[in-house]
Image (cartoon, rainbow, N blue to C red):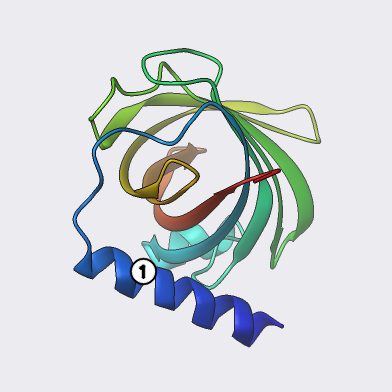
Amino acid sequence: MRAFFLSGLAGLALYASNATALAGQITTGYYYGTGYLASATPSSVCSTFGITPGTTTTGVFYYPGAGKTGATLRSNYSTSKGTGVEAEIFPATPALNVTAWSGTLEEGFETGSQKAVPFTAQFTFFDSDSALVSVVASLTSFGFTCKTTENIVLLKMGV
């Protein structure tokens, strides 16, 4: 199953690298998201947090529309430190026809802890119901920073 997921993700990434981003955005609604952690550096710091390349996530992303607040990703993850649930609340979404997104997201965990995490994201829109997004985030704890890159495929639910 994991090999199928990874080959599908690699296929979408290859498609994205050969495709020009479509004008517009995905439409308002809920999206199933599958993610793959492509990198985590420096590895000595990231592994202390239990974050290693190859980690996968699944979840649900709510997209409120272009230029609006309320975008939220709720996902489960599994690391060398265990499994859990996280919620990420993003700042206002990009305007229509903009594929770059950045700011600070609020990340909360099932333990009740919350962190402000700076991020940048780059979207490749396949159509109004699917996209590939590459998210770079810098997680800081106890004075140490782990920079991650996660590639997430979004597919609209109920389509």
Q: Residue at x 44, y 13 (%)?
A: 68
> Quick check: 136 above or below 100?
below
Q: Quadrant of residue 111?
A: top right
Front residue of 112 and 55: 55
Q: Quadrant of the N terminus?
A: bottom right
Residue 58 placement, left or right of 106: right
> Quick check: 138 above or below 87?
below
Image spot of residue 25 (x, y percent): 36, 34
Q: Tag count in the figure? A: 1
Q: Residue at x 78, y 27 (%)?
A: 112
Residue furthest top as drawn: 68
Front residue of 80 and 156: 156
Residue 132 placement, left or right of 22: right
Image spot of residue 114 (x, y percent): 64, 26
Residue 99 placement, left or right of 86: left
Q: Quadrant of residue 75?
A: top right
Residue furthest bottom as drawn: 3
Question: At label 1, which amino acid type do we have?
Answer: Ala
> Quick check: 76 above or below 88?
below
10 Å crowding of disc 1: few (<14), some (14-19), many (20+): some
Q: Residue at x 24, y 38 (%)?
A: 23
Image spot of residue 57 (x, y percent): 64, 58
Q: Residue at x 46, y 21 (%)?
A: 65
Image spot of residue 150 (x, y percent): 44, 56
The residue that label 1 is drawn on is: 13
Circle 1: element type: helix
> Quick check: 156 above or below 66?
below
Front residue of 51 and 155: 155
Front residue of 28 and 2: 28
